[in-house]
Structure formats: structure tokens, C-alpha cells
Image: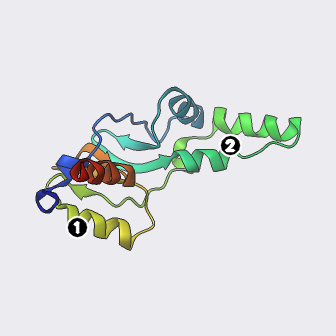
Amino acid sequence: MLNSETANDLMSTKIISLHPKDKMQRVKEVFEAYNIHHIPIMVGNNIVGIISRSDYQQILGIANNSYQEFIKSKIFETHPIEEYMISEIICCDIDTPLESILDLFLANTIRCIPVVKEGKLEGIITPVDLLKRMKKMIN
């Protein structure tokens, strides 16, 4: 039943993370290689930021000429992720009930919630995960 669902039941556990000092080129490589929408930025076991596919696409932007294309390539080659990541992260515990997770999404302008257990990242919940669970419950 939905009333007994927790973050542990809803989260995606296949996570690819990067370090804040990694260059933006790594973000580009990960998003191009994998069908994911959020990359947690980690220092050891601590999540210190997140970068989304939409953040990346905004940085990628549209180059109108070769100079803009050159500048964009230099940003990806030389700038660290920490310059572009979102560092104010709203996380939940692995045992957080579904209702509280929904409240977090509704009260904040966020598209993912990292799930932690004793401070260690265990997974990520997105609105798509919630929709998949709802569809499963309907069927």
C-alpha cells in the first residue's frame, strides 16, 4: 500500500557521482553516456552538491558562432563542477515515509531528493520514480 511506502521503496539506486573538482567535461561525458538526469557531487561519502541535466543543458546553451563554441568548449575543459552545481540540497532518510517525500517536492522547487542512510548516499528519488510507483499501484 502507498501509506506504508518509504524512500527505500521508491528510490533509484544506480547512481553515478562526481567530485566537485572534476571538470565540467566529465558532466558532459556522463550525461551523454547514461540515461540519467541528476549527478550527485560527492566528497568521500558526503553529498555536497548536485547537477541536473537541465543545469548542464543551460550551460551548454546555443552557440551562434565559432567564438561562442570555442568559449563553451573551454568552460567544459577548464571549469570545475563546483562552479555550477547546486550546493543547497534537500535530502531525506531512507525510512522517510512517502507522504513526507511528497511534502518535500511540493514545498520546494526541486526535481530530485537524494536518499541517505546514516549520512551515506543510498539513492535518488525523482517525480518519475513516484509516477512509476503510482502506475504500479493502479495496475
Q: What residue does disc 2 label?
A: 60
- Looking at the image, which residue sits at the far top? 33
Q: In the image, what residue occupies the spot 65% across and 50% down? A: 58
User: Residue 26, position in %: x, y?
Assistant: 54, 31
User: Residue 67, position in %: x, y?
Assistant: 87, 38
User: Residue 36, position in %: x, y?
Assistant: 45, 38
- Residue 17: quarter of image: top left
Q: In the image, what residue occupies the spot 13% across and 55% down? A: 95
Q: In the visual, does 14 lie left or right of 25?
A: left
Frontmost residue, 88 versus 126: 126
- Residue 96: quarter of image: bottom left
| Mark 2: amino acid | Leu
Q: What residue does disc 1 label?
A: 100
Q: In the image, what residue occupies the spot 51% across and 50% down? A: 85
Frontmost residue, 31 versus 44: 31
Q: CA distance from mark 1 to mark 2?
A: 34 Å
